[in-house]
Amino acid sequence: MTAVAFAADREAQARFEAERKRLVWRKRLLPAAAVVGLIALWWFAVEAFQIRPFIAPHPKSVAAMLVERFDVLMANLAPTALEAVLGFLLGNTSAIVIATVFVHKKTAEEAFFPIAVMINTIPVVAKAPILVLMLGNGMEPKIAIAALICFFPTLVNMVRGLSDVNPQALELMRVLSASPREVFFKLRVQNSLPYLFSALKIAASTSVIGAIVGEWIGATKGIGALIIQSTYNFDTPMLYATIVVGSTFSALFFLVIGTIESAVVRWQPQSAR
């Protein structure tokens, strides 16, 4: 390689690294700027329109509550986080297993997929009391609700990801005398990963929602229970602080799944994620 070509290659690599860093900082700074802008708008609206505290508290009051009652908020976040994570694991694992069965047994898919659709159409607030009656008033019904709310999106995405393989790649595997196991793990599973992680990122947020809704039906601890107590007591600063804590955990859960996706699905272009 000549000196000119080597210099051009170094320059191109430097431009690529600079562009990559710019995109990374853009993805970090834009959401932060949006959050700051929303808080500033909230601050302005409360002061400009003199909104009553029991309708919308001042951001300073919510920040003070986050600091003063941090131990209470964390104590109530712990059971909700555990329920959400366990529900996430249970619901998504079940969806992946059933999607695998559906792909290999079309009769099973034709028979049971409509039932999964029907169950998904039942509102969560209608499922919750039934699960409480069946499983009691402990953590089990909250985990089950979180699992159910995660289950259907992952099932649909995983079935599509396992099915929509490139026909030419499938034919090549057959020409190479690949076993069904090799076709499944080396072709179908690899093809399904982008679909799967799209569903998992949705499930990371909805599992928290499911756990909170389950706590509304009957719980003495948890983010859902704290929201109900704050509402009944007209303690809007505590209500908003509880919502902030629950939303922050949901966002962090989403980011964890996104980070795992970046590490696992390395062949997918960054712009497609």
Image (cartoon, helix red, strand yellow):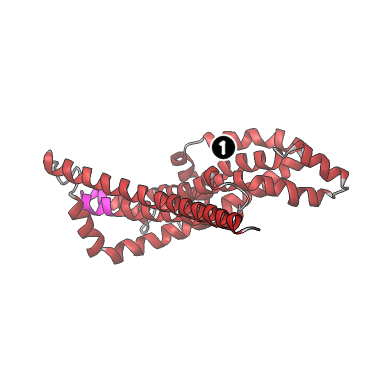
Magenta residue check for 234: yes
- Residue 169, percent across and down? 77, 41
The quarter in which the N terminus is drawn is bottom right
Q: Amino acid at mark 1?
A: Ile
Magenta residue check for 38: no
Along the horizontal axis of the image, is 86 left or right of 61? right
- Residue 78, percent across and down? 40, 62
**Considering depth in this image, is 153 or 48 the residue closer to the camera?**
48
- Residue 260, percent across and down? 55, 57
> Magenta region, mostly helix, strand or loop?
helix
Q: Residue at x 66, y 41 (%)?
A: 161
Along the horizontal axis of the image, is 177 left or right of 3? right
Compared with 9, 34 (above or below) is above
For disc 1, the neighbor class at 10 Å (few under 14, some 14 to 19, many from 20) is some
- Residue 252, percent across and down? 43, 56
Number of dots carrying numbers: 1
Residue stretch in magenta: 230-241
Q: Is residue 89 visible?
A: no
Q: Is residue 154 visible?
A: yes
Q: Residue furthest bottom?
A: 71
Q: Which residue is mark 1?
A: 119
Along the horizontal axis of the image, is 111 left or right of 6? right
| SS type, badge 1 | helix
Q: Dividing the picture into quarters, in which one does residue 272 lie?
A: top right
**Considering depth in this image, is 40 or 20 the residue closer to the camera?**
20
